[in-house]
Image (cartoon, rainbow, N blue to C red):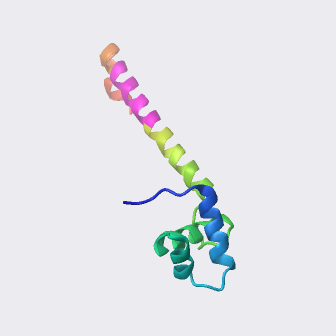
Amino acid sequence: MSKRYTAEFKRDAVALALSSDKTVTEVARDLGVSPEGLRGWVKRAKTDRGGGPAGALTSAEREELVQLRRKVREQEATIEVLGKATAFVCPERKGLLV
């Protein structure tokens, strides 16, 4: 079972991991979190600060991508409904819509 940590806790844990002479595993053990989780938070923080690998998305970019994909799905569903409605109302135009 995974725990949920606040953004403030994650931010503080990352700051501690980056400023400490200890390894990430040792810092994680001291904080009572999983080392893999803390490594992920550190990696995300570095990417958000522009220090990630080339092409890596920041958290803001990831959220925007999720929203845009949701919007595209909604618009595709709307287009499908409109196409079906048009085919029902104007059967002669059935093959003209995408």
Q: Quadrant of residue 88?
A: top left
Residue 79 horizontal/vertical position (percent): 42, 30
Is residue 47 among what the camera can see?
A: no
Judge whether 44 appears above or below 98 on screen.
Answer: below
Give the residue drawn at x 59%, y 63%: 10
> Does the magenta-highlighted stretch encompass residue 79?
yes
Counting the numbered discs, the total is: 0
**Which quadrant, please, contains the N terminus?**
bottom left
Q: Quadrant of residue 56?
A: bottom right
Give the main secondary structure of the magenta stretch.
helix
Judge whether 59 appears above or below 15 on screen.
Answer: above
Residue 36 horizontal/vertical position (percent): 47, 73
Residue 73 horizontal/vertical position (percent): 43, 39
- Closer-to-camera residue (87/46): 46
- Closer-to-camera residue (58/8): 8
Q: Is residue 80 left or right of residue 23?
A: left
Give the residue drawn at x 46%, y 34%: 75
Instruction: Tell me which segment is drawn in magenta.
Output: 74-86
Residue 26 horizontal/vertical position (percent): 54, 81
Give the residue drawn at x 47%, y 41%: 70
Is residue 88 among what the camera can see?
A: yes
